[in-house]
Image: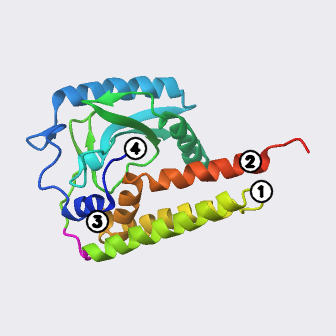
Amino acid sequence: MPTVTVDEAVRDAMRGNEQLSPIFFEGGALRPEVAKKAREVGEEMFRAANVPDGRLADILFAGSLASYEYTRDSDADLHLVVESSTPDPKLFVAYLRALSTTLHQDTGMRFLGVPMQITLVATPDAQGGAWSVVKGAWAHRPERRPVRFAEAELRAAVDGFARARDLEIAEYRRAPATFDCARLAKLRSELKDARGKGLASEAGVVSLGNMSYRVVRRLGWFDEVERVHAQCLDARRSLVRP
């Protein structure tokens, strides 16, 4: 669980970093020992996933630790780019997403002390940075972009989510038998939708929508809503003695 305060998380998001993570990068390139291990792990995890008709096209070291937006509690992300000749691309993407849900569970794997997450993707993420450990070069070079909104705006967006979270969870705790679980799902979806719109905008990774999402995730609030939503669904689906 993050120990950072709201003020610290907001300030870190606004400030960003002047250089890439010195833990993982040197001279603008991913450290050789990291790239070597990332390729070994990526190939092993792809074989274990056993994707039907799938071909491993690339292995990317991606996410905030491949960009300028990392914090001291950022996870490392390894994206396995998988190609397939399946006639239904949407079904294939959904299948990879389902596999990734299992891979995202914390197995205790660490890269230089940092938790590592594995994700199977059909298309590389064009946002932020992505280093190809297969080609030994940037697949997508990160940019340090200026933030175009005030710190107060980010704090207001984060506080707004916190108020909505507190309200919905309190309502659930007050009447779990009758609470509509979809209200918690809607809260999550609204935040993710705002992030998606922000990433699709010109501002990209430094959009208000994306940075709000990142702060909320860093504080553990998004995961909290997911846990309570799961509790709500489990209770609703359970059969109890009269």
Using residue 99 as the reference point, say whether residue 239 is left or right of it.
right
Q: Which segment is the magenta one?
A: 146-150
Q: CA distance from mark 3 to mark 2?
A: 39 Å
Q: Nearer the viewer, mark 3 or mark 1?
A: 1
> Would residue 201 be seen by someone viewing this image from the given angle?
no
Residue 93 percent across, percent down from the top left: 54, 47
Give the residue pinned by disc 1: 177
Give the residue pinned by disc 3: 206
Contact check, label 3 and label 1, Cβ < 8 Å: no
Q: Give me the disc on residue 1.
A: 4
Q: Determine the main secondary structure of the stretch shown in magenta.
A: loop
The amino acid beneath tag 2 is Ala
Q: Residues within 10 Å of mark 4 (few under 14, many from 20)?
A: few
Q: Give me the disc on residue 129.
A: none
Q: Earlier in the sequence, mark 3 or mark 1?
A: 1
Q: Earlier in the sequence, mark 4 or mark 3?
A: 4
Using residue 121 as the reference point, say whether residue 214 is left or right of it.
left
SS at badge 2: helix
Residue 37 percent across, percent down from the top left: 28, 25
Q: Residues within 10 Å of mark 2 (few under 14, many from 20)?
A: few
SS at badge 4: loop
